[in-house]
Image: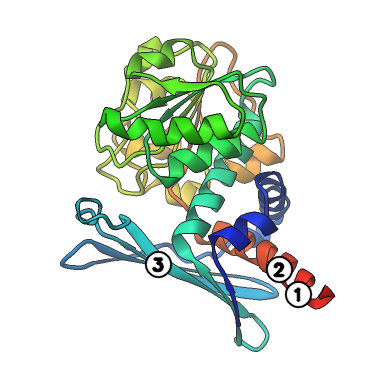
Amino acid sequence: MQRIDEVALRAALPYPDAVAALADAVTNPGTTAGTPPRQIIDTAAGQLLLMPAEIAPYVGVKVVTVAPGNPVLGLPRINGVYLLFDSATLVPVAQFDAAALTAVRTAAVSALAVDRLAPAEASRLVVFGAGPQAIAHVEAIAAVRQLRSVRVVTRTPDRAPAVVEWALRLGLAASAGSPDSIADADLVACCTTARQPLFDSSRLLAEATVVAVGSHEPDARELDAALVRQATVVVESRASAATAGDLVLAGDPAELVAGDLADLVAGRVTPASGRPRVFKSVGEAWEDLVVAAAAYTRVSAVSQDR
């Protein structure tokens, strides 16, 4: 069984390739249909999440723990493993670091949505958050848009420099910002554990594109209701939208959503002129499987060539 760590995953599947794999997969109705919903089990220290999926020739399952108290102990908030199996024999073929896989696939899904929602000239990014998802989103969005500036907004100011330094290493003009930085941003990525809106959406540019990935719970949100109600809203799927607090707390998700990711990629969603665009992600198991399978295929091909 191959063990694929973060370094091997990133080397095997750069963001442009991860975005392309997801775009190809979502055009197949069988990719997302029938994916079981995330199973959430409460534990004394947090939550255990189980996310299985099958897309032949592979079956996969992600087992993730979320421990809110870990950061003060110097430990990651999210830990876990991803197991990939051959679907015909159910023999395990690869094991991934689930946190690394989650960061890559979440950012790649956001980049796919940004590429279809944002104007081609969008170039000023504001990122809320200082964790792995914030870092991943800077790189992933830079893979689909030519970024002229990146501003990093964090609740704790001393955490912003790590993301800023990462962006600088990518060759991007980056600096720390504040919630008001969204006033001249045409791209906004919300990658936090916040349970209340991060900014006043009335200050957004008319056609700004906002992605929100921080919450999968119906009582937590990063976006205010006003933004969700006026924006062209795209979700991964209408089924998972029912668990997204950003939508649930703004009204009836079924009425707020303009389309899902498959609709967006197929060109069935047209952003309204003069209004913001929102992509709300809660994370779905098929995304993990698509990225894991693509990376495993490439790692195996390299191993066989040696």
Q: Amino acid at mark 2?
A: Val
Say if mark 1 contacts mark 3, CB within 8 Å: no
Tally of numbered tags: 3
Q: Report which residue position mark 3 lands on.
A: 80
Q: Is residue 34 in view?
A: yes
Which secondary structure, mark 2? helix
Residue 303's disc is 1
Q: Position of residue 275 (x, y in %)?
A: 52, 15
Q: CA distance from mark 1 to mark 3?
A: 25 Å
Q: Amino acid at mark 1?
A: Ser
Q: Which one is nearer the viewer's eye here, 22 or 218? A: 22
Say if mark 1 contacts mark 2, CB within 8 Å: yes
Q: Report which residue position mark 2 lands on.
A: 299
Q: CA distance from mark 3 to mark 2?
A: 21 Å
Which residue extends farthest right? Answer: 305
Q: Quadrant of residue 224?
A: top left
Q: Earlier in the sequence, mark 3 or mark 2?
A: 3
Q: Position of residue 172 (x, y in %)?
A: 58, 26
Q: Amino acid at mark 3?
A: Gly
With 202 as the anchor, is 283 left or right in this view?
A: right
